[in-house]
Image (cartoon, rainbow, N blue to C red):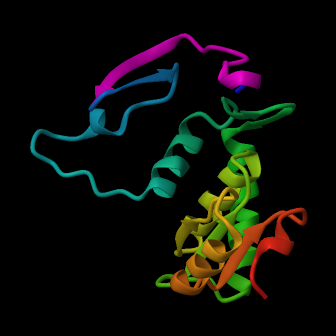
Amino acid sequence: MGRGGQLDQVAEPAHAHQHDHLDLVLPKGVTYPAESLAEGEEYTKCLHVLFEAQVARTPDLLALVDGDKKYTYQELNEASDALAAYLRTHGVKTETAVGIFMERSAEYVVAYLAALKAGAAYCPIELAYPQPLVKDVCENVQALVILTKSEHAHILPE
């Protein structure tokens, strides 16, 4: 996204879908998960599994643009895999939680995918929260790890 919420590039859509009140437009090569379901079949795949399936289909397709940073699906997958492996070395696994305390950015997407790949639940902790609320959320969630940037670390409780 460019400044002011405008897209820097617009990919010609291969598919467009209506979901509730949102229009979902997907670039060429990216498929909507429901297209592969048989009639009456329930969709049960986790987001990170769907993401990895997309990586296998279109590894070199641009997946994420954040200012000057651009990630292909393969690059985003490698970054999130590396962080997921690191999280696992710190005890993150199924039935644990990872807090994410940063602005929406490429790093946020990597953190989110990594938490899921490590088997954890993730909890977004908004930068706009007042410090007492940040403390309450951190205590209630009992996140094993909170991913943040150095400029935000001072806001987190000890």
Instruction: Give percent across and percent down for residue 33.
Output: 35, 39
Please state the extent of the stretch shown in magenta in the rendering. Answer: 2-19
- Where 49 falls versus 65 (above or below)? below
Question: In the rendered image, which quarter contains the C terminus?
Answer: bottom right
- Where 114 falls versus 119 (above or below)? above
Residue at 76% x, 65% y: name it.
Answer: 82
| Front residue (pair 14, 5) | 5
Horizontal placement of 44 versus 61: left or right?
A: left
Instruction: Give percent across and percent down for residue 138.
Output: 61, 80
Asked if residue 26 lies in the magenta stretch, the reply is no
Asked if residue 18 lies in the magenta stretch, the reply is yes
- Where 12 falls versus 104 (above or below)? above
Instruction: Give percent across and percent down for residue 107.
Output: 76, 52
Picture mark count: 0
Horizontal placement of 62 versus 31: left or right?
A: right
Residue at 38% x, 18% y: name it.
Answer: 16
Question: In the rendered image, which quarter contains the N terminus?
Answer: top right
Horizontal placement of 12 versus 34: left or right?
A: right
Residue at 67% x, 56% y: name it.
Answer: 128
Farthest residue to the top: give it. Answer: 12
- Where 82 falls versus 39 (above or below)? below
Rendered image quadrant of residue 110? bottom right
| Front residue (pair 52, 101) | 101
Instruction: Give percent across and percent down for residue 83.
Output: 74, 67
Farthest residue to the left: give it. Answer: 40
Residue at 66% x, 40% y: name it.
Answer: 73
